[in-house]
């Protein structure tokens, strides 16, 4: 399959949930577009996550508005494969113009004419505008403190699949957001000796007074928060939908046999050292947990909601030994630790996007995804417009805003004043058909291509 040198109104890069949401809104508004995906639809849900991963939110919440999961109970948690299948079905539902197996290698703004030239693995494309939907979590980040020690197996959570992948022996899991706690739990249940390095975190209750925390964050306006509270850039959220969903409780993980340690500070001579912040991190996580219960109670009372009271949710057990007398260092060989799992997050990579849309630190400059470089849009980034932006339900609403912006811009560009009434080659429609046909007509629809 080759992509002939062709012209399209709007090119969307990436067919994860963001690219699919974008395509739905553009289709609805009649904007000719093409989605290019280097692998398969929702590839990151298929291969960029561990085998046992299920969605962190229940199926009624973690979905787009126009389709329910058919194979998951609304209060259940879809497996990663079910999430990926959901997006394939969603794209088929509106016949999304997606080409899989085509990588965008470079995008350059055209000189003295409108639009962009896009080099792909299958040829060159011209587009009036581009929507970058390549994901919030593109490049796994391992901090520079990682030891240069060939006797240790070290992997990032993006490359973790299951316990069998790791060698015999204990594991240090660094990072206790949703990925770190779930992986540590799985490794411990598989019989491994596990040390879990815990930094600053939020840990909302899985459910309270009969409602999932996703519901509480929704009604309390937390998903819609537009900016991150200052000083919370390094605070992760620890939630889990695994084993039917449960509240992440570090004390319970310790009772289970996991040794909690503070933030990992350094490695030297085979010894890991940890900050003396474990008890404080656990206490701050409790504060966050209790503050959500308080806000939920206040909301229920103010609105006269008849939800069952749950006083037992406020009982916080005593700190375990590993919190009251924390390890400050760990000789990895003596402790039998043979591997490290870095659950330390991701960065973005826009090295292929040669446009003037970044600040001096390389961060995209945009307002709700509309870049300061006309014609460039970003979608799916954390906090693009609000807290929910990188999540399944949130990206759909951000895509809607971007699609509306695109339609408005198309109207401006399609405007002719009277003197130009017969001038060929001006405006969007003529530009789209520059090579004789709308590029949309050459696009293989998802249903024709099959989804590989
Ligand atoms: C472990 C984990 C669990 C998560 N669980 C949940 C959850 O339960 N609920 C929830 O709402 N959110 C969850 N998220 C957050 C978010 O929903 C996912 O990260 C989701 O994959 C983001 O979708 P996206 O479409 O923005 O990006 P991605 O899924 O990353 O999709 C981007 C696509 O772009 C393609 N691409 C990249 N570069 C190019 C290129 N140059 N050319 C062509 N194609 C390209 C990639 O192949 C990929 O398919 C989770 C995230 C992680 C890491």
Image (tube, helix red, strand yellow):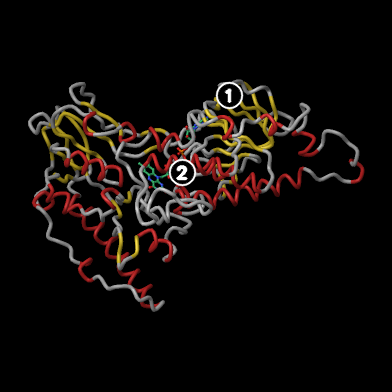
Q: In this view, does 32 lie to the left or right of 336?
A: right
Residue at the far front in the pictured view: 71
Nearest the camera: 428 or 329? 428
Q: Which of marks 2 and 1 is nearer the N terminus?
A: 2
Residue at 30% over, 47% down = 178
The answer to which quarter of the image holds residue 251 is bottom left
The residue wearing badge 2 is 86
Q: Is residue 132 left or right of residue 4?
A: left
| Residue 312 drawn at (x, y percent) | 20, 68
Nearest the camera: 286 or 330? 286
| Residue 144 drawn at (x, y percent) | 30, 31
Residue at 16% over, 40% down = 195
The answer to which quarter of the image holds residue 212 is bottom left
The residue wearing badge 1 is 120
Q: How crowded is mark 1: few (under 14 residues within 10 Å), some or many (20 or more)?
A: some
Mark 1 vs ligand 1: CB below 8 Å: yes
Q: How far apart are marks 2 and 1 (CA)?
A: 27 Å
């Amino acid at each position: 399959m080759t992509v002939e040198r062709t012209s399209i109104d709007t090119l969307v890069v990436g067919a994860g949930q963001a690219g699919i949401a974008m395509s739905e809104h553009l289709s609805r508004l009649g904007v000719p577009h093409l989605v290019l995906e280097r692998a398969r639809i929702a590839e990151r849900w298929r291969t960029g996550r561990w085998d046992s991963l299920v969605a962190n939110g229940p199926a009624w919440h973690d979905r787009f508005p126009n389709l329910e999961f058919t194979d998951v109970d609304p209060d259940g948690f879809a497996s990663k494969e079910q999430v990926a299948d959901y997006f394939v079905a969603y794209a088929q539902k509106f016949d999304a113009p997606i080409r899989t197996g085509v990588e965008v290698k470079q995008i350059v703004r055209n000189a003295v004419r409108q639009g962009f030239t896009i080099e792909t693995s299958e040829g060159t494309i011209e587009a009036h505008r581009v929507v970058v939907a390549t994901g919030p979590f593109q490049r796994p980040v391992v901090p520079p403190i990682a030891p240069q020690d060939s006797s240790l197996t070290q992997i990032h959570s993006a490359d973790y699949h299951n316990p069998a992948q790791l060698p015999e022996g204990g594991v240090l899991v660094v990072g206790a957001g949703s990925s770190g706690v779930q992986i540590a739990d799985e490794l411990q249940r598989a019989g491994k000796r596990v040390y879990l390095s815990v930094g600053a975190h939020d840990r909302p209750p899985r459910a309270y007074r009969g409602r999932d925390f996703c519901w509480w964050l929704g009604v309390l306006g937390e998903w819609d928060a537009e900016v991150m509270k200052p000083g919370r850039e390094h605070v992760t959220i620890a939630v889990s939908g695994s084993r039917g969903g449960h509240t992440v409780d570090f004390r319970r993980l310790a009772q289970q046999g996991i040794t909690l340690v503070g933030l990992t500070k350094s490695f030297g001579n085979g010894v890991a050292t940890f900050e003396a912040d474990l008890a404080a991190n656990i206490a701050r996580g409790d504060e966050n947990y209790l503050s959500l219960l308080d806000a939920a109670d206040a909301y229920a009372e103010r609105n006269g909601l008849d939800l069952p009271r749950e006083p037992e949710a406020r009982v916080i057990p005593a700190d375990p030994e590993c919190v009251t007398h924390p390890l400050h260092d760990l000789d990895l060989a003596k402790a039998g630790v043979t591997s490290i799992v870095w659950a330390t997050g991701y960065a973005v990579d826009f090295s292929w996007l040669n446009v003037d849309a970044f600040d001096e630190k390389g961060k995209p400059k945009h307002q709700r995804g509309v870049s300061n470089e006309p014609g460039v849009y970003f979608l799916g980034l954390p906090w693009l417009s609000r807290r929910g932006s990188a999540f399944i339900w949130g990206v759909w609403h951000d895509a809607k805003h971007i699609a509306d912006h695109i339609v408005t811009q198309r109207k401006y560009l399609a405007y002719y004043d009277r003197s130009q009434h017969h001038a060929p080659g001006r405006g969007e429609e003529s530009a789209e058909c520059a090579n004789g046909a709308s590029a949309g007509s050459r696009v293989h629809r998802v249903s024709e291509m099959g989804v590989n």
